[in-house]
Image: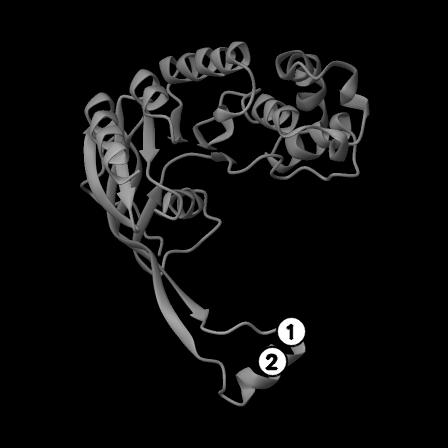
């Protein structure tokens, strides 16, 4: 749930989570059609099990830091980012965000596959709250940073996953965001493009942008982030300096392989 800024907050905190949990009620058996689901639900024949995607998460993320989030698939990383991006409302707890969130939660998020790259640039720019003049002034910079060349005039459905990620990051980062949320998008693309993204993120950090970065690569987290959290089964295993958390996570991954 959302509430007013508490007195304990200070000017150095952009994201505050207190006791945040997300609970799903999942059907225990498959239902083939929506009609069948509606009928069986009205008859009380749908059995569900409760699943905690996030359990009692407490975090304070500082203004201007790059904060890493690590964990295996299903650990709750993407759910946490969706809560912070206000895509999901937590079942329990309090969430306070200070600033406009620019989420890039998956490859090609917000892109219409039948529209061209150019059309999607204007569509996404509008969704991010920018007017036509703002987008036009950034258009050449976005295309140049994404390195997609003449493909900007082709439908996005013809793009590779790497091209979609590059264009998505280029649009999301064309303007200085207050809070930038990235979910594994930097794992796609060649090393040179990844370095361009890292450089831009560091420039944002120096200018006060708060960045949340999900990554399965401990080396990326330790090199880019100041602090990090390790999630497992929706709970915090460890939180602290990024290099130390990355080392712990990497050692644990070697054990469980």
Quarter containing the C terminus: top left
Which residue does the image show at 26% across and 26% down from the upper left? 246
| View extreme (bottom): residue | 43
Decide if residue 224 is on the left or right side of residue 82: left
**Nearer to the camera, 7 or 144:** 144
Residue located at (31% from left, 56% from top): 21
- Is residue 12 shown to the viewer in this render? no
Image spot of residue 248 (x, y percent): 20, 30
Tell me, yes or no, whether the two marked residues, 2 and 1, touch with CB atoms within 8 Å. yes
Q: Position of residue 83 (x, y in %)?
A: 41, 48
Image location (x, y in percent) of residue 43: 53, 90
Q: CA distance from mark 2 to mark 1?
A: 6 Å
Q: Is label 1 in a helix, a strand or a loop?
A: helix
- Mark 2 highlights which residue? 38
Q: Which mark is residue 204?
A: none
Where does label 1 land, which residue?
A: 34
């Amino acid at each position: 749930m959302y509430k007013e800024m508490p007195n304990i907050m200070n000017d150095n905190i952009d994201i505050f989570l207190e006791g945040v949990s997300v609970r799903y009620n999942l059907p225990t058996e498959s239902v083939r059609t929506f009609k069948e689901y509606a009928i069986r639900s009205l008859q009380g024949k749908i059995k569900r099990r409760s699943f905690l995607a996030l359990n009692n998460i407490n975090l304070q993320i500082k203004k201007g830091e790059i904060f890493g989030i690590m964990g295996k698939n299903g650990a709750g990383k993407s759910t946490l980012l969706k809560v912070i991006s206000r895509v999901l409302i937590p079942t329990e707890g309090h969430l306070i965000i200070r600033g406009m969130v620019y989420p890039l939660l998956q490859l090609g998020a917000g892109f219409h596959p039948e529209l061209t790259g150019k059309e999607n640039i204007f569509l996404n720019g509008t969704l991010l709250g920018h007017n036509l003049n703002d987008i036009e002034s950034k258009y050449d910079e976005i295309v140049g940073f994404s390195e997609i060349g003449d493909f900007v005039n082709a439908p996005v459905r013809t793009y590779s996953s790497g091209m979609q990620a590059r264009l998505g990051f280029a649009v999301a980062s064309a303007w200085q965001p207050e809070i930038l949320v990235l979910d594994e998008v930097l794992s796609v693309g060649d090393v040179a493009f990844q370095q361009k993204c890292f450089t831009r993120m560091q420039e944002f950090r120096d200018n006060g942008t708060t960045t949340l970065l999900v990554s399965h690569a401990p080396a990326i987290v330790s090199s880019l982030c100041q602090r990090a959290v390790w999630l497992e089964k929706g709970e915090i295993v460890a939180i602290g300096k990024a290099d130390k958390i990355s080392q712990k996570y990497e050692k644990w991954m070697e054990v469980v392989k």
